[in-house]
Image: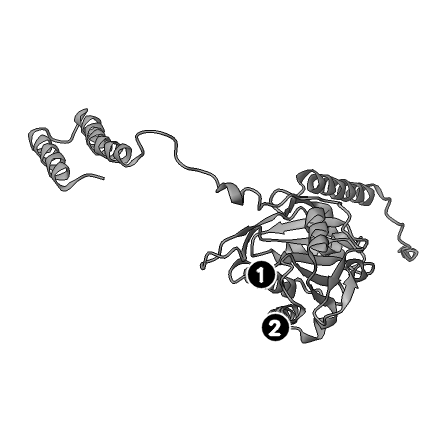
Amino acid sequence: MLSGKESMVSHFVLHSTVRRFPLRGAWMPVLVLLALVACAMPSQAQYSADQPTGGTPQTGLPAYLKNAGIAQNLNRKLPLSAQFINSSGKTVAFGQYFGKRPIVLAEVYFNCGMLCPQVLHGAADSLKQTGLKAGKDYDVVVASFDPQDTSQQAAQEKQRFLNWLGDPSAASGVHFLTGTQPSIDALTGATGFHYVRVPGPDGKLDQFAHSSVIMVATPDGRLSKYFSGIEYAPRDLRLAMVDASDHKIGTATDLFLLYCCNYNPTSGKYTVAILRVLGLAGCVTILIVLGMFYLLTRKPKGRNFPPSSPTATA
């Protein structure tokens, strides 16, 4: 950016030059070049002055946050024998929610006031748009990784999730769990979900740094897909559940999209498989050509014309 004084000087020089030498012939590109140089040099100087003159910029996360990432353990078997407590206060085996339908899994803690509610709200909003129904096509399992969370809190969070989902009848397919540290460690270790305690506003170590992610697991308890962030594309989530169910749910359109798309673990999205689409297009083209060749080479059926009457002679 030019300062006021520099702008006035540049304008005066350019105006004086224009009055002495009309803008025609070879002078036009020269003046344009001079104007560009006059504007660019102060801008570059201003940019350089604003940058640090020594050392390297501080990049990356604090040391304690580097252990709060996510490792995608695709196809890893979940700890189905681990014991948790459901929102009704009953001790249950984690594996009792598996066996029939794919599972949408989230790991949060119920005292979280920022990220966890956004993860659950994003999951509910996306599931609502998939066209599939909890308890019929899939189940939702939300497990707390804070051993101090209670079943009463789990019941409150479950009700809030059902409100976001907009389907109170889906309660039988939505499960909120708490657990002891050994069970929590077994689950987070299997899913690759890492978290660390951090101080809250009051200085107490009652907060957690963690990733925002939901997962899809197969009915037999294996991790199938990961979706990071707080907003999840309904189409991708639906395809993930159809894929995890071994195509036992979904429509013919879902199967067609699964054939034409590949899941990208890095982005957590389904992208078009170019080679598959080209192969499918090639097959369709060959069928069309064969059909046209058959129609063009087929002999026309003879037509039965009525016998002509003999012509009268004079």
Nearer to me, 20 or 101:
101
In the rendered view, does 83 fall on the left or right side of 123? right
- Amino acid at pointer 2: Asn
Which residue corresponds to the image point at 65% horizontal and 71% vertical from the top-left?
152
In whole angstroms, how far apart are the C-alphas of marks 2 and 1? Answer: 13 Å
Q: Secondary structure at mark 2?
A: helix
The quadrant where residue 80 appears: bottom right
Residue located beneath label 1 in the image: 122
Nearer to me, 196 or 68:
196
- Outermost residue on the top side: it is 26
How is the model colour-coded?
A: one colour
* Rendering coords of residue 240 (x, y %): 70, 53
Number of numbered discs visible in the structure rendering:
2
In the rendered view, does 58 fall on the left or right side of 76? left
* Rendering coords of residue 78 (x, y %): 76, 51
Q: Residues within 10 Å of mark 2 (few under 14, many from 20)?
A: few
Residue located beneath label 2 in the image: 163
* Rendering coords of residue 124 (x, y %): 62, 64
Which residue corresponds to the image point at 72% horizontal and 47% vertical from the top-left?
190
